Image (tube, rainbow, N blue to C red):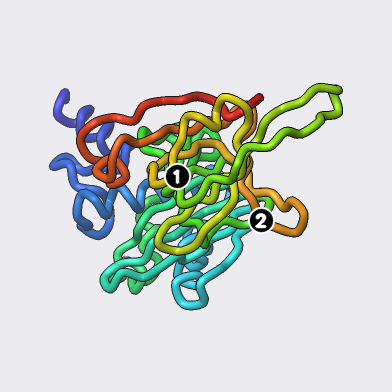
Amino acid sequence: MQTKTLANARAERGWTFRGRPRGRFHSYSDTRLLEYLAQVSLGHEIDLNEFFAKFVEAWENRKSTCKKLGIECRRKTGDSAIFLITTDNKVIAQFPIPEYLLKETTPLKEFGYVRPRVKKPLMNEKESSEPICLRIEDLKVGMKRVNLRARVSEISEPRWAFTRFHDYVMFANVILSDETSAIRLTLWNDRIKLVSVNDFIQIKNAEVIMFRGETQLKVGKKGEFEVLKNNLEMQGLEEGPRIIGNNTR
């Protein structure tokens, strides 16, 4: 009786008595990925098969949309493709999907059992311990909550500006670059002294804006940036970053 009850409980969670997922026997990592996609699909009230078909469409045509979600295939790596998910110009998720899964016919249809777990739309970046860092070439005006790792390739001479609050502030323009492109970021007052040319920095919760006809990065009150001590940290290795704080005046 106890064994039967345990088996029924596991079945309700979508697993057989031996711990295998219902349906095809995908690997553990593939199962976790497909369960996650199913939760996202159901959380946004999107049909499972339709949702996965949009990834295949983006894989073939680079971009697709599914209700309020934008799906973009950022790049293909030979045996997989990396997808970027946005909503209302906010970056919410990025992850790879193996090519063999993209060639499967409706792989999510076996994962409807995750429905009881779905309480709200998922793919919240805050649930991840690692920030989703974009490349500069992927930045678009209007994007918010942008995370970026880049090198300081240029810093202008500091200048003074008169504000609408009738005071003066010092600012300097910093050019950030990675292997794909470059973008301008304005630093204010004491923040200027905290970075040097060739520093690697990590920026969190920034916005991409248009200022005087140029696409620029803005780190507001909720944003922050970190100076990484060396190139190893740029690769996420060894010593942790030194947190500087918000780039606000």
Q: Earlier in the sequence, mark 2 or mark 1?
A: 1
Along the line of sight, which residue is nearer the eye, 10 or 60? 60
Q: Is the residue under label 1 in contact with that under label 2 (CB below 8 Å)?
A: no
Q: 249 left or right of 212?
A: left
Residue 65, horizontal then vertical, whole percent: 60, 63
Which SS class for mark 2? strand
Neighbour class for label 1 at 10 Å: few (<14), some, many (≥20)? many
Along the line of sight, which residue is nearer the eye, 23 or 130? 130
Residue extending farthest bottom:
60
Disc 1 designates what residue? 39
Q: Label 2, label 1: how many angstroms apart (C-alpha)?
A: 35 Å
Q: Which residue is pictured at 40% across the width and 62% down the height?
A: 179
- Looking at the rendering, which quadrant does residue 205 occupy? top right
Disc 2 designates what residue? 215
Residue 242, horizontal then vertical, whole percent: 36, 27
- Looking at the rendering, which quadrant does residue 237 occupy? top left
